[in-house]
Image (tube, rainbow, N blue to C red):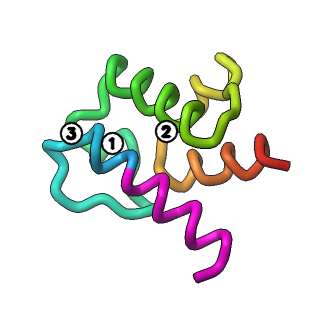
């Protein structure tokens, strides 16, 4: 498994833990098709990602996050 795939799997696992009502999650899942992606779960998602990767996603960046794929991009940016 590549490092990229590893990060994607970790992020998907975190998202599945938070978005329990949505049965199918993948990299293309987004705020429009994840029924329980609300403001509270968004905050929880950012907090869990920050904790897991020991990063601190800025408020400006967190507001732009609207898909699983986008989260992967942001994490890569912060891990550099």
Q: For the magenta stretch, what is the residue range?
A: 1-13
Residue position for label 2? 66
Within 10 Å of disc 1 (Cα), the crowding (few <14, some 14-19, many 20+) is few
Residue 80 in the image, given as x and y percentages of width and height? 85, 49
In the displayed structure, would residue 70 be above or below residue 6? above
| Along the viewing direction, whichever of 63 and 47 lies nearer the viewer | 47
Residue most extreme to the right = 80
Residue 58 in the image, given as x and y percentages of width and height? 70, 21
Per the image, label 1 sits on a secondary structure element best described as loop
Residue 20 in the image, given as x and y percentages of width and height? 18, 43
Within 10 Å of disc 2 (Cα), the crowding (few <14, some 14-19, many 20+) is some
Q: Earlier in the sequence, mark 3 or mark 2?
A: 3
Residue most extreme to the bottom = 1
Residue position for label 1? 32
How far is the residue under mark 3 from the one under mark 2?
13 Å
Indicate the quadrant containing the N terminus: top left, top right, bottom left or bottom right: bottom right
Q: Which label lies toward us, 1 or 3? A: 3
How far is the residue under mark 1 from the one under mark 3?
7 Å
Residue position for label 3? 35
Mark 1 near mark 3, Cβ–Cβ under 8 Å? no
Which residue is rendered at x = 37% and y = 63% of the image? 26
In the displayed structure, would residue 18 be above or below residue 72? above
How far is the residue under mark 1 from the one under mark 2?
8 Å
Question: In the image, 12: left or right of 53?
Answer: left
Q: Earlier in the sequence, mark 1 or mark 2?
A: 1
Magenta residues: mostly which secondary structure? helix
Residue 51 in the image, given as x and y percentages of width and height? 55, 32
Mark 1 near mark 2, Cβ–Cβ under 8 Å? no
Using the rendered view, name the quadrant where residue 6 is placed: bottom right
């Amino acid at each position: 498994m590549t490092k990229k795939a590893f990060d994607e799997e970790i992020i998907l696992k975190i998202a599945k833990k938070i978005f329990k009502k949505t049965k199918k999650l993948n990299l293309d899942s987004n705020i429009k098709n994840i029924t329980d992606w609300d403001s509270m779960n968004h905050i929880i998602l950012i907090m869990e990602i920050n904790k897991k990767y020991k990063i601190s996603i800025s408020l400006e960046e967190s507001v732009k996050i609207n898909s699983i794929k986008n989260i992967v991009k942001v994490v890569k940016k912060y891990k550099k």
